[in-house]
Image (spheres, rainbow, N blue to C red):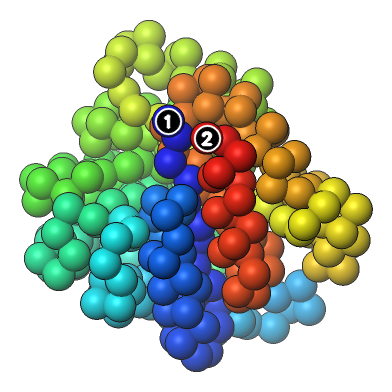
Amino acid sequence: MVDVAITLPNFVRDPAVALDIARRADATESIAAVFGYDHLFRVARDGTRRPAIECFALLSAVAASTHRVRLGALVARASMRPPAVLAANVATLGRIAGSRVVAGLGAGDGESRAENEAFGLGFGSVHERLDELASAVGAVVATGVETWVGGSAALVGACAARAGVWNRWGGDAERFASEVRALRSSSPGLRVTWGGLVVLAVDDESAAARARRLGAPASALVGSPRAVADRLRAYVHAGADTVVLAPVDSSVPDNVALVGAVADALG
């Protein structure tokens, strides 16, 4: 059976918006987890900066406001905190929420450069960022909290093997399956998960209209819960035991019921 998770709306000024989504997800029987993004800001389509709620502060509030769902970062960038600080954040969250915590870690990509540099964090080469990721993985795994490593298989495979779980963000199911085969050829017991953008509505026509209104990227899965569930089966067949759905309009409360319906359709 596959677990279905939903992302939280980090890019808002009022934390109550994100906490409402988390509580609604917790009240369902079908959504297994909620995930927050780790960003200091995001750039809107018009070029303005959108506010962001700090990931671990939000997750602590979520932990105190929920009882059932798992919660975690997808993903915490290794370049934003020294390994010991990141491990302390994760361990503290674990003391609050117990075994419900998932520590998603990543090296960052080109979209992170402006954010890192705006706050004086620097943005090293790919090799430097992978070294930072390896240090972070070692520190966080030592806390005993379940750890996922996000990124392309070719770059983060060794770190994912050490953590025990790999997360792929986006990409089609064929590519995902190919990367899973490559990773498991050297790490047979590796767990794999997948996450990506979605636009959901009660039927396919309404979802398509919603996607156009939102300017959703072509990579987003668009459709009714049953249609999106049908597309997700290819990722599950490739080995994903968890799929994390990120509604493009993540602040809208009705997404919780729609993601729950996807989970029900996947069975």
Query: Toward the viewer: 129 or 221?
Result: 221
> In the rendering, at what x and y percent does residue 22 appear?
43, 70
Tell me if residue 263 comes above or below residue 54 in the rendering: above
- Asked if residue 189 lies left or right of residue 114, the reply is left
Query: Toward the viewer: 69 or 191?
Result: 69
Q: Which residue is mark 2?
A: 267
- Mark 1 and mark 2 in contact? Answer it, CB < 8 Å: yes
Q: Which residue is mark 1?
A: 1
Where is the N terminus found, in terms of image quarters? top left
Q: Amino acid at mark 1?
A: Met
Tell me if residue 28 comes above or below residue 180 in the rendering: below
Residue 38 seen:
no
- Asked if residue 190 lies left or right of residue 226, the reply is left
State the SS at label 1.
Answer: loop
Q: Tell me which residue sits at (28%, 52%) in the image.
A: 102
Q: Quadrant of residue 210?
A: bottom right
Q: Quadrant of residue 184?
A: top left
> In the rendering, at what x and y percent does residue 129 appear?
37, 47
Q: Tell me which residue sits at (44%, 86%) in the image.
A: 15
